Image: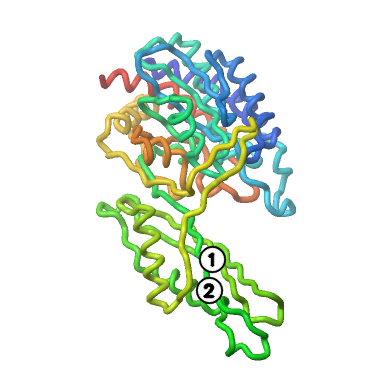
Amino acid sequence: MDSKKILEKAREYRDYTAQNLSKIIQVPAFSTKEKERIYLLKQLSEEAGMEDLWIDGLGSLLGRVGKGSKKIVFDAHIDTVGVGDETQWKFPPFSGLIKDGLVHGRGASDQLGGAASMITAARILKELGYSGDYEVWFSFTAIEEDCDGMCWKYLIEEEKFVPDLAVSTEPTSCRLYRGHRGRMEIQINIEGISCHGSAPERGDSAAYKAARAALAIEKLNERLQPDDDHFLGKGTIVVSQIDVHGPSQCSVPDQAMLYCDRRLTWGETDEIAIKQVEDALREAGVNNFTVHMPEFRKPAWTGTEYHQELYFPTWKIPADHMLVQSGVDAYTSLYGKAPVIDKWTFSTNGVAICGRHKIPVIGFGPGDEEQAHAPNETTRIDDLEMAAAFYAALPYALEARK
């Protein structure tokens, strides 16, 4: 691996990477509405020299450089959340403004910066004539913000596209990540008995049951324990929505719904989490309830209808895994020091690639996790340059360890 040449090319294409990120930001793309951005990315990928570009049934774009016996894929989801209260933004959220060493706009860190750096890495590899053991694939995936990992469940199970290794380019502040907690969504439905509000003793209020249930969930969160090696930390659960209603404003409510966000540490599963909620509600004296895991069900921009339960398994790979160590080698060869190794707080497509399908994943991406979903989102152009160099260097580092 010629680390010096890779660094020189990443530096040469620094403005190119930032300008591509700006262009991508300027074409809004929310989950299931990614078509225009996908076609822009296809154009940029073609210009960078990617081959075999194709769009799968859910609307994700893939392309490759090199032709080997094994596959490594660099993944970036290219949908974003909305902008929220636009008055909180200093610059228009889809401006893609390049200023003071930053690229501004929705998705700059989460996670279009990774996509822009991937395009540059493909260009670097192409110009270096990479011809090693790996087909180096780049995936620009859809619907992650609404249902993380479903794009990869579809790619693996329906398209039969199965890589040997993967790199998530979600923001890591250019640190090397090797896992994160899983998550699931849990819905609690509670039944009461309605009656006229002038005589509430005749009924059984679903509102009061919901209140007891919410406090029981708060206590459950306090009892959850971390994983054995304390790498991922403790699981969490929070009530994110409560809906209570009945026949009228003058009635005791007979229906309640609580929606919960559950983060799962190593060893926790969907079955364990649902039983914990059921036990907590019974302990709190709540009756006539059901607990279930909802499904995501929404057509992709291609029109394909696909669905899955809202369960996203925990994953991590060992610090001494070949992929982690190759990442350390690549980073060290470029920058003369070892990277910080850590994990994400939030969830990524790794829940499907590694959590569900056991394909080893590491994370390395430009930008900061704290920027995700926040107003005035930015990413550093320095990070874009570093990430492009790392992605180009990793296939060579993998081969050096074979």
For label 2, the residue is: 210
> Would you say 246 lies left or right of 161 here?
right
Horizontal and vertical percent position of residue 334: 39, 25
Q: Which residue is located at x 33 percent, y 42 percent? A: 316
The C terminus - image quarter? top left
Q: Position of residue 167 (x, y in %)?
A: 42, 31
Is any part of residue 157 visible from this angle? yes
Q: Are marks 1 and 2 in contact (CB under 8 Å)?
A: yes
Kindly state the secondary structure of the residue where label 2 is placed.
helix
Query: What secondary structure is found at the residue carrying circle 1?
Result: strand
- The tally of labels here is 2
Q: Quadrant of the N terminus?
A: top left
Q: Name the image quarter holding residue 274.
A: bottom left
Q: Amino acid at mark 1?
A: Leu
Question: Looking at the image, is 14 positioned above or below residue 247?
Answer: above
Picture residue at 48% right of the left edge, 47% below the top: 309
The residue shown at (53%, 23%) is: 62
The foreground one among 77 and 118 is 77
Q: Which residue is mark 1?
A: 258
* Amino acid type shown at disc 2: Ala
Quadrant in which residue 38 is drawn: top right
Instruction: Give percent across and percent down for residue 218.
Output: 44, 70
Query: Height in image: 52 above or below 163?
Result: above
How packed mark 1 is, by other alpha carbons closer than 10 Å (few <14, some 14-19, many 20 or more), is: many
Q: Residues within 10 Å of mark 2 (few under 14, many from 20)?
A: many
Tell me which corner region of the image, top left, top right, bottom left or bottom right, holds residue 364.
Answer: top left
Whichever of callouts 1 and 2 sits on the residue coming sooner in the sequence is: 2
Seen in the image, is 62 located left or right of residue 376?
left
Q: Residue at x 27, y 33 (%)?
A: 321
